[in-house]
């Protein structure tokens, strides 16, 4: 079991969607409010899943160069049009669509996120490292009370994860060796990319990210530097 | 007297050195500690002023293209060598110089800065907009308790103020009109550059920035959107 002393780690960089905040229930809740106001009968869980399902393909279009650098707010807005059409929602004005698109700025944290981050912040520099754009992450932090030391994003390097530029960003900015930086994420693909670039890795289990009964297994402890149940468990394991 | 409603302003972007933190007395204090430890007899006020005096010329070398993009920590470190030689300080090791160079990460806030920012943060997004690099500003915030919503820097655009890219950064990231963003600074040249790019401006008087008896006059109220004594006065005037 790999379990380095937390003493050599200086900065914790967090994936955000799914790791820090519960995008799915947040989108469902705002969808239901919108549905009530606009007299729509929609399966908002299916809507949330459909919107999120086109997230990765939209990033891929930027990564393949089919689109120039485009911030996530704009990608979300483009895919929202597609999903609204698919769900036959036709009675929203542009300002109503713009407002709903910014639900991603208003996502709710998992119950342990704020308390866990506050403990970790006392010992480490804590930053976002997300594909969300800087204003999205800033507004989310303000809305949810997330106590980041700084906001870093794919937007800083104009490359989306898992492009190498994103994993090099924190070591470059903070003049650190890669192994002095740890990525914290609920997604193994993100952690494995971080490992390729020499970062430490902390897995956090978020069994409800995709809804009840959709959780994968907790990976073996040896696979990442820390394998944790939630941010409080991470803080315990890191003596923060 | 120009006094727009603060209601149309969404983001306050703060100059940092001199505006939020008292670089001069912080450098003097750490210099005196260093002098005691290393048995040096140095006029640390003169040292601080000399180090700061080569700040603008070092940025100018980057802006003229004589140096490639170079973060402020590195410029400070280069100019520290020059000033140490000028003051005939020869008995510092490289780690001691590196540590002293990072005094700029440990600058102390003016007495009103933290309380004023906390009030302003309740109503506006508050961000740095400084020539300091991102890690410097992040470490400073952690050290001094500055409650920024995000950390933005010349480093985001790899251009130093007053290059236009720096004043366009906040409107671009937050999808705002320039007049929805206000630069807060103690330096009229910075504010006048911001005005050229359509930003609102808030002047804050910092009469002790360059030491006692070195203060310029408070500018006429009509010259900027807000002309204030300190951050608490700014919060009062903006009803925050």
Image (tube, coloured by chain):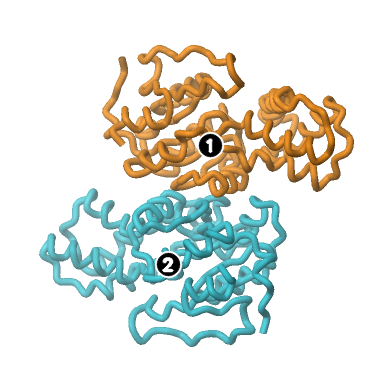
Chain colours: A cyan, B orange
Q: Position of residue A33 (x, y in %)?
A: 18, 63
Instruction: Quickly name the residue at label 1.
Output: B109
Which chain's residue wears label 2? A
Point 63% across, 30% down: residue: B25
Q: Check disc 2: other Cα within 10 Å, few if <14, some if 14-19, many if 20+.
A: many
Instruction: Quickly name the residue at label 2.
Output: A113
* Disc assigned to residue B56: none
Give the spatial CA distance, label 1 vs label 2: 29 Å
Kindly indicate the quadrant of the structure image that contains residue B183: top left
Of the pair B23 and A48, the residue shown nearer to us: B23
Q: Where B22 sits versus A56, above or below?
A: above
Of badges 1 and 2, nearer the viewer stands 1
Same chain assignment for discs 1 and 2: no
Point 45% across, 53% down: residue: A133
Please tell me whether mark 1 sits on a helix, a strand or a loop: strand
Of the pair B18 and A185, the residue shown nearer to us: B18
């Amino acid at each position: 079991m790999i379990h380095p002393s937390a003493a050599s780690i200086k900065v914790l960089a967090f994936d955000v969607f799914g790791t820090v905040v519960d995008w799915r229930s947040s989108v469902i809740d705002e969808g239901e409010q919108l549905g009530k106001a606009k007299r729509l009968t929609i399966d908002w869980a299916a809507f949330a899943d459909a919107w999120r399902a086109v997230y990765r393909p939209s990033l891929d279009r930027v990564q393949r160069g089919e689109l120039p650098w485009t911030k996530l707010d704009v990608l979300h807005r483009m895919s929202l049009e597609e999903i609204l059409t698919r769900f036959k929602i036709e009675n929203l004005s542009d300002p109503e669509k713009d407002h709903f698109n910014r639900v991603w700025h208003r996502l709710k944290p998992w119950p342990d996120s704020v308390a866990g981050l506050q403990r970790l912040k006392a010992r480490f520099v804590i930053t976002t490292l997300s594909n969300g754009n800087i204003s999205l992450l800033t507004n989310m932090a303000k809305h949810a009370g997330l106590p980041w030391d700084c906001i870093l994003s794919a937007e800083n390097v104009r490359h989306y994860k898992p492009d190498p530029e994103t994993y090099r960003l924190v070591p470059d900015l903070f003049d650190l060796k890669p192994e002095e930086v740890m990525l914290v994420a609920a997604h193994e693909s993100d952690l494995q990319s971080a490992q390729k670039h020499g970062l430490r890795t902390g897995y956090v289990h978020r069994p409800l990210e995709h809804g009840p009964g959709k959780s994968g297994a907790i990976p073996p402890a040896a696979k990442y530097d820390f394998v944790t149940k939630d941010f409080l468990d991470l803080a315990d394991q890191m003596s923060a």
